[in-house]
């Protein structure tokens, strides 16, 4: 199995890995390519087309706003909840998109650590683009050949010429594949599988390794993970994932109102939690399913 535990359990903006995290990562990748290829100064307009499922259910899954965040250079595993609220409020007020803002700031600070906040703000303000959710083109009935979750991003210059055109597919679990790079992705996965001491692609093969080596599933997975990072890095990374899960759970149990996405779905967790605390103050195992469902 080539997929790392850190691929399976991604820290990222919710609510969906395929409809929120994946599109945000694709938009970030597109913005990053504009910067890395020195094209950012030429951009005066953007076009984003969403296909299939991304177009059909994107509003309720936060797809559209996630793409705007990615275009500004925010990454789903690094953005703070406070930043999400701040940026989305700015979009709702009609403010322009700050294309690759976070990427250019990071590059400037890395190159000149003593750069002042004023200088970084001046740099990012040069790439204001008038682009918002309503400018995205939705094609729910059109399915691209590779996958139902497809998106095309284009950057145009002042004359209307395309200076960068990329197509991405959000294939699940937050994974994205850029059109034309499919073979490279498969080659990378095959190389990673062959580098593991206990390679497997089925549960039967996993259990075979456990039986022959006298190891538990966790020990087999740890041995495979050690081909990519140290044990200290693995344990630190897993602790971080657990901490984020706990923070999300604790935050959700307190937040009232409706869920984002425009569907006006009322948050149920706070009231449910209050009832469970009254009903089961001593955490009787008989209520385990109710507690699990509450967190879910």
Image (cartoon, rainbow, N blue to C red):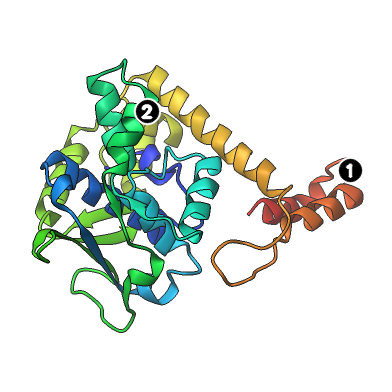
**C-alpha span from label 1 to label 2:** 53 Å
Residue 189 seen in the current view: no
- The residue where tag 1 is placed is 281
Left or right of residue 57, residue 281 in this image: right
* Residue farthest toward the bottom in the current orientation of the protein: 141
Nearer-the-camera pick, 50 or 99: 99
| Residue 255 - label | none
Q: Residue at coordinates 42% horizontally, 43% vertically from top-left?
A: 10
Residue 16 on image: x %, y %: 46, 58
- In this rendering, the answer to whether 256 lies above or below 51 is above
Count of numbered labels shown in the rendering: 2
Residue 166 on image: x %, y %: 16, 59
- In this rendering, the answer to whether 162 lies above or below 97 is below
Residue 191 on image: x %, y %: 14, 39
Residue 64 on image: x %, y %: 40, 63
- The residue where tag 2 is placed is 118
**Kind of element beneath mark 2:** helix
1 or 2: tag closer to the N-terminus: 2
- In this rendering, the answer to whether 291 lies above or below 122 is below
Nearest to the eye among marks 1 and 2: give it. Answer: 2
**Kind of element beneath mark 1:** loop
User: How many other residues sit within 10 Å of disc 1, few (<14), some (14-19) or many (≥20)?
Assistant: few
Q: Quadrant of the N terminus?
A: top left
- In this rendering, the answer to whether 85 lies above or below 23 is above
Left or right of residue 190, residue 275 in this image: right
């Amino acid at each position: 199995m080539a997929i790392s535990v850190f691929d399976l359990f991604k820290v990222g903006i919710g609510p969906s890995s395929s409809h929120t995290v994946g599109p945000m990562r694709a938009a970030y990748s597109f913005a990053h390519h504009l910067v890395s290829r020195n094209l950012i100064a030429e951009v005066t307009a953007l076009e984003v087309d969403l296909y299939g499922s991304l177009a059909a259910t994107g509003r309720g899954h936060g797809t559209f706003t996630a793409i705007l965040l990615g275009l500004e250079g925010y990454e789903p595993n690094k953005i703070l909840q406070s930043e999400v609220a701040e940026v989305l409020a700015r979009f709702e007020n009609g403010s322009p998109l700050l294309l690759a803002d976070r990427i250019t700031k990071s590059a400037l600070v890395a190159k000149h650590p003593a750069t002042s906040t004023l200088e970084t703000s001046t740099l990012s303000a040069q790439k204001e683009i008038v682009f918002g959710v309503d400018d995205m083109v939705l094609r729910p009935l059109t399915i691209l050949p590779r996958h139902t979750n497809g998106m095309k991003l284009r950057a145009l210059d002042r004359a209307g010429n395309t200076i960068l055109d990329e197509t991405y597919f959000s294939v699940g679990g937050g994974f994205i594949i850029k059109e034309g790079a499919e073979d490279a992705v498969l080659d990378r996965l095959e190389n990673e599988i062959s580098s593991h001491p206990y390679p497997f692609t089925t549960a039967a093969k996993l259990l075979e390794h456990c039986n022959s080596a006298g190891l538990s599933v966790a020990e087999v997975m740890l041995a495979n993970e050690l081909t990519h990072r140290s044990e200290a890095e693995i344990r630190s990374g897993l602790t971080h994932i657990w901490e984020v899960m706990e923070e999300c759970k604790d935050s959700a149990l307190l937040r009232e109102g409706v869920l984002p996405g425009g569907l006006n779905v009322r948050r149920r967790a706070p009231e449910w939690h209050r009832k469970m605390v009254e009903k089961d103050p001593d955490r009787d195992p008989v209520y385990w399913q109710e507690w699990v469902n509450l967190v879910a």
